[in-house]
Image (cartoon, rainbow, N blue to C red):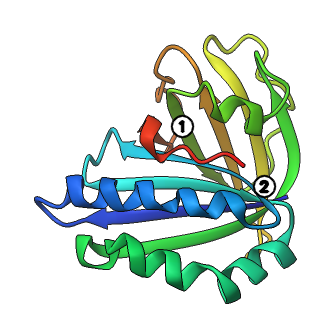
Amino acid sequence: MLIKWIACQVREGQKQSFSRGQEQWRAVREVDGFLGQAGGWNVSDPAEAVILAFWRDEAAYRAFMANHHDPIFAKTRQQQTYERIRVELYERVRDMPGTMENVLDALAVGKWLRLERRPVLPEADSLAGWTGAAAGVAGKAVKDGGRFLVATVWDAAQPDQEGTSGAIIAALEDAWLVLP
């Protein structure tokens, strides 16, 4: 599975326009190999939109980029709403079950998304005991194999940031959820 992490620094006064544009990405649900997408606003930087998308594999993602991305993007008119965009790709290394078996199932019930880059793969392969943790996934960076992403979806309490350096917590927007 390929994980795509998108972060957009949205221009002042453009959050509503960006959000309406983000809802247009529902069209991606028909694309072969698309597994799911969710996103919301970074609680520490309310002008940063955070989106996490899941693809069957890199080939399906590349086919989407070549054949479907640009027409959908043009329809969203999001280009005028943000100053910067950062895209990172990760290959799934392991699932991290919590109250649910996998992160794709957790997207449907998620209220919070927690993202953390790490220099090493975490040892924990389960979120058991983390109150509110529905499920997560760990991925290895496609371009820099020495970096890892731990993405967790939370269905209840806001995840705690204490003891974590650089973790991003986003309040998920229901209207941005796209499932096949």
Q: Is residue 44 left or right of residue 1?
A: left
Quarter of image, res 77: bottom left
Q: Is residue 56 above or below residue 157?
A: below
What amino acid is labelled 1 in the image? Leu
Quarter of image, res 34: bottom right
- The local secondary structure at tag 1 comes to strand
> Can you tell which mark lies on residue 139?
2
Front residue of 88/28: it is 28
- The local secondary structure at tag 2 comes to strand
> Can you tell which mark lies on residue 113?
1
Query: Which mark lies nearer to you, 2 or 1?
Result: 1
Q: Is residue 69 above or below residue 165?
A: below
Q: Position of residue 95 (x, y in %)?
A: 86, 39
Front residue of 163/149: it is 149
Q: Position of residue 42 (x, y in %)?
A: 37, 45
Q: Position of residue 7 (x, y in %)?
A: 45, 62
What amino acid is labelled 2 in the image? Gly
